[in-house]
Image: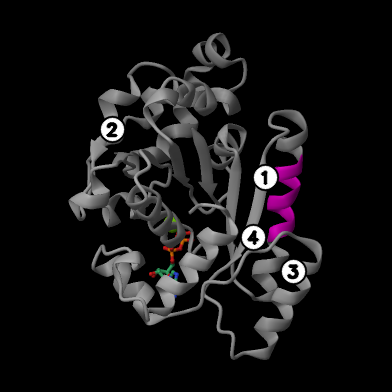
Amino acid sequence: MKVITVGNNKGGVGKTMCSFQLVCHLAHLGNRVLVLDLDSQANLSSTLGVTIQRTLIPEWLIGDVKASEIMVPVEGDEEYSKNIKLIPASRHMANLAKLLILSEAEVRKNAGRKERLLKLRLKEVEADFDYVVIDTPPMLGDELIMSLVASDKILIPTQAQDYSIDGLEELMDTFEIIKESENPALEFSIVPSMVNPRRKIERQRLEELGQSFSVTPMIRNLVEMQESVALKKPVFKFGSKSKGRQDYEALWDSLGLV
Ligand SMILES: Nc1ncnc2c1ncn2[C@@H]1O[C@H](COP(=O)(O)OP(=O)(O)OP(=O)(O)O)[C@@H](O)[C@H]1O
Ligand SMILES: [Mg+2]
């Protein structure tokens, strides 16, 4: 079972878009995919057709309920949706930090440190899935840190603008700390997101970024990507001339996810 987190502490950079396309792509290939929505905005859950009042993710993390009790099926064409199970988010996720403090005794008994809780819980479903894909909120909080400890890889959607690239430093520092202390096998790839390749400044910034980091092929800024989310229709269902489909195919290809 491979665990892939999509994360960036910067907001609105295309994390949920990338998560949605990745989940549907992997399921379409026949993989059994568990989707974990750790963002209390619950955008990925709603794109997969699921809205709930109150998530039990905090209770699952501290071991009060089992993953199988909180997983739900998703909407979409049977051909891929049958391979997907979702642990949905809701606004109550905002209570995660509070709950973890209140349950500190249990956390210590179970995992030693709260950053390890998610890794521990995912071990329990290891035989049931080929992939876990985690969408995370736009901050360097417990959700993202737990996900990094539990993951094989983090995909970091990044816009080709100065302030977006500058913000990467903080995330990369955290990545290095977690890699050294908790998860030496953790890998990362920066995914240029919502790029306008006609703008010279964006092309330059991407080239510079590629000199210091591992950068994948870019995802362009395209109206059809917004349609994909609005229609809850992944880009692989679009025609072969679709630029969005081509961009994502090149991305999965470069990551070996084919
Ligand atoms: N390649 C793209 N082309 C055009 N629009 C895009 C593209 N990718 C994402 N968008 C749009 O940009 C907005 C932000 O994308 P998304 O919700 O995926 O970002 P996010 O990083 O998950 O945001 P948040 O930090 O709030 O969770 C959405 O309206 C989405 O439809
Ligand atoms: Mg999001």
Q: Magenta part of the protein: which range?
A: 168-176
Q: Are marks 3 and 1 in contact (CB under 8 Å)?
A: no
Marks 3 and 2, the one that precedes in the sequence: 2
Across and down, in percent, residue 149 comes to 61, 33
Give me the C-alpha separation between circle 4 and circle 2: 29 Å
Q: Residue furthest toward the right?
A: 211
- The amino acid type found where label 2 is placed reads Met
Q: Are marks 1 and 4 in contact (CB under 8 Å)?
A: no
Residue receiving disc 2: 71
Q: Using the image, tell me which numbered label, if any, was put on residue 190.
A: 4
Say whether residue 172 is magenta: yes
Marks 3 and 4, the one that precedes in the sequence: 4
Marks 3 and 1, the one that precedes in the sequence: 1
Q: Compare residues 206 and 112 and report the one nearer the observer.
A: 206
- The amino acid type found where label 3 is placed reads Leu
- Check disc 4 and report its element: helix, strand or loop: strand
Observer-side mark, 3 or 1, equals: 1
Q: Are marks 3 and 4 in contact (CB under 8 Å)?
A: yes
Please indicate whether residue 169 sits to the left or right of residue 139 in the image.
Answer: right
Please indicate whether residue 30 sits to the left or right of residue 212 in the image.
Answer: left
Residue receiving disc 3: 209
- Check disc 1 and report its element: helix, strand or loop: strand
Q: Using the image, tell me which numbered label, if any, was put on residue 187.
A: 1
Q: Residue at x 73, y 37 (%)?
A: 179
Give me the C-alpha separation between circle 1 and circle 4: 10 Å
- Check disc 2 and report its element: helix, strand or loop: loop
Picture quadrant of residue 131: top left
- The amino acid type found where label 4 is placed reads Ile
